[in-house]
Every structure is written in C-alpha cells, then in structure tokens.
Amino acid sequence: MKKTAGRYLSLDFLRGLTIFGMVLSAIQPGGVMPGWMYHVQNPPPTHELDMGVPGIGWVDLVFPIFIFCMGAAIPFAKPSIKGIFSRFGMLWLFSYLYVFIISSNNWVTLAGFAALFPLYMVYKTPPRILGREINVPLIRCAGVLLVLAVIAVNHFCFGEAISVQRRGIIIFLLAFLYLFGSLIWHFTQENLRGRAAIFGLILAFTLVTQYKEWPTITYANPNIRWWFNVEYFYFLLLLIPATYIGDLLKRRISQGIQIFNEGNKGASVALASLSLALVVWMTFAFYMQLYWWNLVLSGIMLAGIYRIAKRHFPQYVPIVQMAGYLIIAGEIIEPCGGGIKKVPCTIQYCLATCGMAGMLLLVSDFICHRIPGSFFVKTFERAGKNPLMCYIAFSCLVQPLMEITGAIYLYRLAYPEGMHLVGFLRSAAVVLLTMWIVGQFTKRKIFWKA
C-alpha cells in the first residue's frame, strides 16, 4: 500500500501534478495556442475575462483538484483549533510575502526566496550552529526580519508597491478555504450528518447569494474585495465532500486495506483507464457544451467503474459512489444559471470537478502502485509534499536564475514563431525542472509548511 508515516502518497502525487498544471498554465505562451489550452473564460488572443462564456477546460480543472487535495488531506493532519488558526495566519501571510519579494532585480528575488526558509521551514529538532542549539522561535523571528528587509529594499530601491491589494489570490483564497473547511471538519469529524447539514446550508447560501448577486456587489467594493469575497464559501461545496473522502482514505490506511490486489492487474488497469477516460471525456464535453451526450456517456462509464470496483476492489466503492453522485448532480444542473463556469464560481462547477478529482485519485493510486520508484512518480510525489515551495519556485528561484545566467535567451529561442506545440513543450520542460528542484529539497527533508 502506498503510505508513509501517516501520509497518503497518491494524494501527494496528485497534488504535485496539480501544481505542475497551475504553473504551466501561468507561463505557457499567451494568445497563440488553441482556446482549449487556456481558461475557457479568458480566450485568446486578448485573454480578457468574459463571464458570459460557459464551459471548462483542463486549465480550469487544476485549481479545484488542488482544493480537493487540501480537503482530503485535512483528516490526515487532524488539526487542532489552535493549529487551524495558526496555519490560516501563515498561509494568509504567505499570500502577501511571496508577491512582495518578487522584484525587477533578480538578486533581490533570490534573496527573498532564501529569506522565506527560516520563516516557513519545518524543524523536527532544533538546528545546531557551531555546536549550539538554536531556538526555533528565534529562527522564525530572524526570518521575519530578513523578509522585511528584502521587502524594504524592493520597495525603496526598486519601487515595488506595498499594498493590501497586492497578494497571490490563489494562496489567499486557499487560506480562507482551509480555515472554514478545517473548522467544519474539526467539529463534525464524528458527525457526518452534521457535516452534510452544513453542506446543505452552504448550498442554500450559494443559491440565495448568487440570486442576489452578492459576489458582484462585494467584488465591486475595493474596501471589501481585498480581504473577502462571497465566493470563498462556494468552494466549500468542493472541499467538504473532499474531507469525507479523506476520512475514507485515512480509515482504509488504519485498517491496512490494500490499494490494489496483485491478483487483479487486468481489473486495476480497466478501473484506472476508465476513470481517466471519464475525466477526459467530461472535460471535452463541458468545453464543447455536449449536455446530453455528456450525461449519457458519463453515466455509462460511471456504471462500468462502479461494477469493476464492486467486483474486484470494494475498498473503492464508497469513493466511486461519492464521486459519481457529485458528477451526475453537476451534469444534471449544468445548463442552469448560464452553464458551468469557474468565474463566477457555479454550483455545478464545484460538484462536477470534485467528482472528477475523486476519479483522478483512483488513477493516481494505480500509477503510484504500478511504478512507485519511477522518476515521474518520485518527482511529482516529492513536489506534492512541498506545495508552498513548489508553487513559487519557478517565479522566485528558477526564472531569476535563468535571467542571471542568460539561460532565459535559450528558453526564448526554443519557441520558433508559429510552432505552438514546441512552445508548450518548452514551458512544460522548465516546469518539470522546477518540480525536480523542489523534489531535491524534499528528498533532503527540507520542507516549507504554513
């Protein structure tokens, strides 16, 4: 079984793949590739936001899958109330710090990246310098001073603005989702009916506030939007079911139940292949707005996945059932409210993508079980264990080093005009390099943690 010291490594692998997708979608060539290579509502060539466009593509999947991984990991961490608020505060702070340290001067950016180590690095035992044990809180204080010094240099010497409006919106949103989701799980960890009731209340809140257009109202007010958006609650429709799946995974580990039985290799291939085919088909169908085809073919594939799981892998039946319910519910209501959209976040988007993430977890289990020691698995697994570092490593480490060494010119030359596939593969290669570098930190037990 793929587990290590209370971790579910298939979940780490899936998280690593998701961060790969996040970074890749952010740096791939803009305006020149087919529309399905970008956020559906930010189509090329201008990439201006058009909230009237329904549908999702692969780029629109990476963020909800990351939220799913966060929710499924909460039961493994089993956070206390104090730990929940502490981690929220550190995540919230991180969403500002990593933006403030990015500079027009590459050396300053690198210094800022280095300064984050004493502030966010995990210390299982107090480090020793010159034979003397150093108090961890003292190291944290030194980290604060170093980061503040970098930000000051960045602001006063290079004109980088310091503002509450300047923050990494993804980490900012994840901080609030972690806070709300962890508190809900903490108070309902032994009460699934209570968790389901809260899910129902959030669903009702979503319906009412969308009808009243509260997200538009709050976002239009700059004094509010910098710290709060009503849509933060909507994503809990994705995160709360993920905590239930996390409970199932943790229970399976505690009972020593295997991921796949060695005697059923053909069935495991069929289960993983059909699960992946389902996600690919749904993404295509949502993008092309094939409502009835999507509903019918997805239902057939779900029935096949359930039959294989029930016959050969009963440990997967509860996950398949939950993911299936979410997928079908999301598909049925897909045309409502203008269709499935990431912006503004819709109910069908949260439900369907959560179910799709659950199916991808089965695929991750299969990959990590069949080729556990491969470069591919190890790279993404290690990167997934170090998500904070992995998320900013390209912009704060790899890209500045490429600028300083001149490798950035080779990177730009590797995209001949008109050869869009080459440009995409170039971007994928440099992100893979980033993941590998973070993996080397992880291999040496160097982790960042909020």
Image (tube, grey):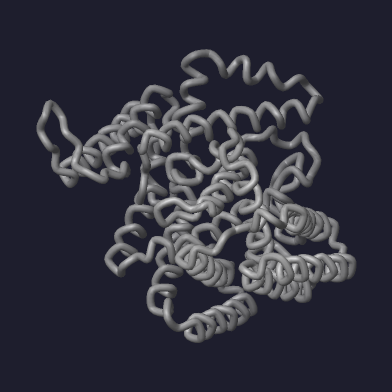
60 vs 205: above or below:
above
Q: Nearer the viewer, residue 364 or 354?
A: 364
Asked if residue 98 can be seen in this view, the reply is: yes
Q: Along the line of sight, which residue is nearer the eye, 425 or 94?
A: 425
Residue at 82% x, 71% y is: 299
Which residue is painted at 63% across and 41% down in the image?
Answer: 371
Q: Is residue 107 above or below residue 351?
A: above
Position of residue 241 measured from the top left corner of the image (x, y, whole percent): 56, 71
Assign the N terminus to one quadrant of the image.
bottom right
Examine the image and state in which quarter residue 347 appears. bottom right
Give the percent coordinates (x, y) of residue 151.
32, 36
Residue 77 location, x and y as percent?
Answer: 39, 61
Query: For this view, does 126 lie left or right of residue 13?
Result: left
Q: In which quadrant of the rendered view does residue 386 lie?
A: top left
* Number of disc labels: 0
Instruction: Identify the residue at horizontal 65%, vertical 45% (top origin).
Output: 370
Residue at image location 60% in from the left, 58% down from the top: 259
Is residue 424 placed above or below 301 in the rendered structure? above
Q: Residue pushed farthest front?
A: 263
* Relative image position of residue 328 (x, y in whole percent): 75, 73
Residue closest to the eye, 251 or 64: 251
Residue 230 visible to an observer of this rendering: no
Q: Residue furthest right?
A: 293
